[in-house]
């Protein structure tokens, strides 16, 4: 089990980011949580984890779509707790709408948070990091194979995978390691909100890669970071889906189209845009 001096996590106020923050605090790591806001319940969990690990944590409000603000907050966190030896960008947003229903401003917002936000955080934090440290960007399995009704989300997460790949080529030779985290669906508050009004075809397709409990996903992600893995895909079904898409693209895409066609007919949508 690896212990870090300072872990910095964007999106650490809820979901996967919060789950990872709790695990690192229990190990005794000092943690900086960067997010738009944090609930009283989240603060209580972080306080309890810090007590268990006999360490400390700090919260900084940040909008990662604003580079100047992100840079200022990162530098403030570094001033308080030192340069991070693990920095994780877990901030993100999802929209589940068919392309025909997706408005330009919705597409721009998702890309601005997920992709531009990843760039902003990396741009702000990498100059503070020393050889032996690690930057991890949370993408998604949707950044490897996408999904029906994921025009905005899939495009943004494919971009995150591409960004992480480039950073790997540029920073690994300098001794700064890069990880790209690509989970399938994880049962977080963001996903619960997505399901409330998601495209029904998209929801049926999600069953292919399965859905993970947040605790299981966080445990596997942290284990992957401990092992120094470049690409981290928690869950057997997620790994199998990514394998099929990469190594058997013809059969995999034929299967996807067959399943989509079946779902369209099931929902009476075969002859109209959804």
Image (cartoon, rainbow, N blue to C red):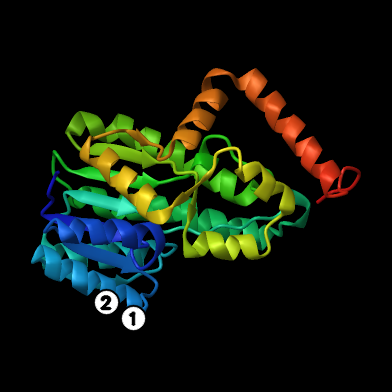
- Res. 56 visible in picture: no
* Between 219 and 92, the one nearer to me in the picture: 219
* Between 125 and 213, the one nearer to me in the picture: 213
Q: Are marks 1 and 2 in contact (CB under 8 Å)?
A: yes
* Residue 89: image location, x then y, percent: 35, 53
Q: Residue at x 69, y 27 (%)?
A: 255
- In the image, 170: left or right of 82? right
* Residue 84: image location, x then y, percent: 17, 53
Q: Residue at x 44, y 62 (%)?
A: 65
Q: Residues within 10 Å of mark 1 (few under 14, many from 20)?
A: few
Residue matched to label 1: 40
Residue furthest out toward the bottom: 40
Q: Residue at x 66, y 50 (%)?
A: 203
- In the image, 97: left or right of 33? right
Q: Residue at x 12, y 63 (%)?
A: 53
Quadrant of the drawing holding the N terminus: top left
Mark 2, secondary structure of its residue: helix
Which disc, if any, is residue 12? none
* Residue 149: image location, x then y, percent: 69, 48
Q: Is residue 154 above or below residue 78?
A: above
- In the image, 208: left or right of 45? right
Residue matched to label 2: 44
Residue furthest out toward the right: 271
What distance separates the C-alpha of mark 1 from that of mark 2? 6 Å
* Between 260 and 65, the one nearer to me in the picture: 260
Instruction: Determine the image quadrant of residue 101.
Output: bottom right
- Res. 47 visible in picture: yes
* Residue 56: image location, x then y, percent: 13, 69
């Amino acid at each position: 089990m690896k212990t870090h001096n300072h872990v910095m996590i964007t999106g650490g106020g809820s979901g996967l980011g919060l789950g990872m923050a709790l695990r690192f605090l229990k190990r005794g790591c000092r943690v900086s949580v960067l997010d738009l806001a944090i609930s009283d319940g989240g603060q209580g969990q972080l306080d309890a984890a810090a007590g268990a690990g006999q360490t400390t944590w700090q919260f900084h409000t940040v909008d990662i779509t604003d580079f100047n603000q992100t840079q200022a907050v990162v530098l403030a966190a570094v001033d308080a707790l030192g340069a991070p030896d693990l920095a994780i960008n877990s901030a993100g947003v999802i929209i589940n709408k068919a392309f025909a229903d997706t408005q330009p401003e919705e597409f721009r917002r998702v890309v601005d948070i997920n992709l531009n936000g990843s760039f902003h955080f990396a741009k702000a934090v990498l100059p503070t990091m020393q050889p032996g440290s690690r930057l991890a960007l949370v993408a998604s399995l949707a950044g490897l194979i996408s999904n029906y009704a994921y025009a905005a989300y899939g495009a943004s997460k494919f971009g995150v995978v591409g960004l992480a790949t480039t950073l790997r080529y540029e920073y690994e030779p300098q001794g700064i390691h890069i990880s790209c985290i690509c989970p399938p669906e994880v049962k977080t508050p963001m996903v619960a909100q997505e399901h409330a009004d998601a495209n029904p075809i998209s929801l049926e397709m999600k069953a292919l890669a399965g859905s993970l409990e947040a605790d299981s996903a966080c445990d596997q992600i942290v284990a992957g970071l401990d092992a120094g893995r470049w690409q981290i895909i928690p869950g057997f079904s997620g790994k199998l889906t990514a394998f099929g898409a990469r190594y058997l693209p013809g059969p995999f895409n034929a299967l996807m189209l067959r399943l989509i066609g079946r779902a369209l007919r099931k929902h009476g949508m075969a002859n109209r845009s959804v």
